[in-house]
Image (spheres, rainbow, N blue to C red):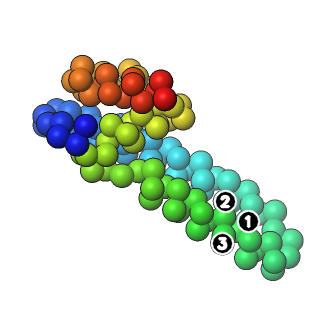
Amino acid sequence: MQNLNWSDSEKKLARRVFEAALKTELAEIMTAFKVQVAALATPDEMWAIQGVLARKQREIEEKYDYRYSQLIMVFGRLVNEGRVTREQLRGLSDEKRSFVERLLLL
């Protein structure tokens, strides 16, 4: 998968799909964060949120890797999580979509 060639149109599609999934997930994290902040009652609870945010940041940084050598794995994971649909990947080559489908079977 590391040696796949990406056409310009595939790169544009991949960027759009990637950014949309990232934006949605970040919005979900932000909403949850605001709810947690609004419910704070003690200073200890405030510090606990810092740990949650640090973990979420690591998860996002690990999951959303926009290197072409990693995108198939990223898309496989995002489809599996329901953050990206197969339809959104329709502009990718059959070979790339086939790799994503194989990842879903694991």
SS assignment at label 1: helix
Residue 64's spot in the image, x, y percent?
A: 41, 50
Query: In the picture provided, is 87 more to the left or to the right than 38?
Result: left
**Which of the two labelled residues, at mark 3 and mark 1, occupies the earlier sequence position?**
1
**Circle 3 sits on which residue?**
50
Query: In the picture provided, is 11 more to the left or to the right than 85?
Result: left
Asked whether the residues under the numbered discs 3 and 1 touch, taking CB atoms below 8 Å apart as contact, a structural biologist would say no
Query: In the picture provided, is 57 more to the left or to the right than 35?
Result: left
The answer to whether one can see residue 12 in this image is: no
**Circle 1 sits on which residue?**
37
Reply above or below: 65 against 93: below
Res 102 → quadrant: top left
Please tell me which residue is depicted at 49% across the width and 29% down the height of the picture.
106
Residue 40's spot in the image, x, y percent?
A: 81, 68
**Circle 2 sits on which residue?**
33
Asked whether the residues under the numbered discs 3 and 2 touch, taking CB atoms below 8 Å apart as contact, a structural biologist would say no
Residue 71's spot in the image, x, y percent?
A: 32, 42
Q: CA distance from mark 3 to mark 1?
A: 11 Å
The answer to whether one can see residue 100 in this image is: yes
- Image quadrant occupied by the N terminus: top left
Reply above or below: 29 against 8: below
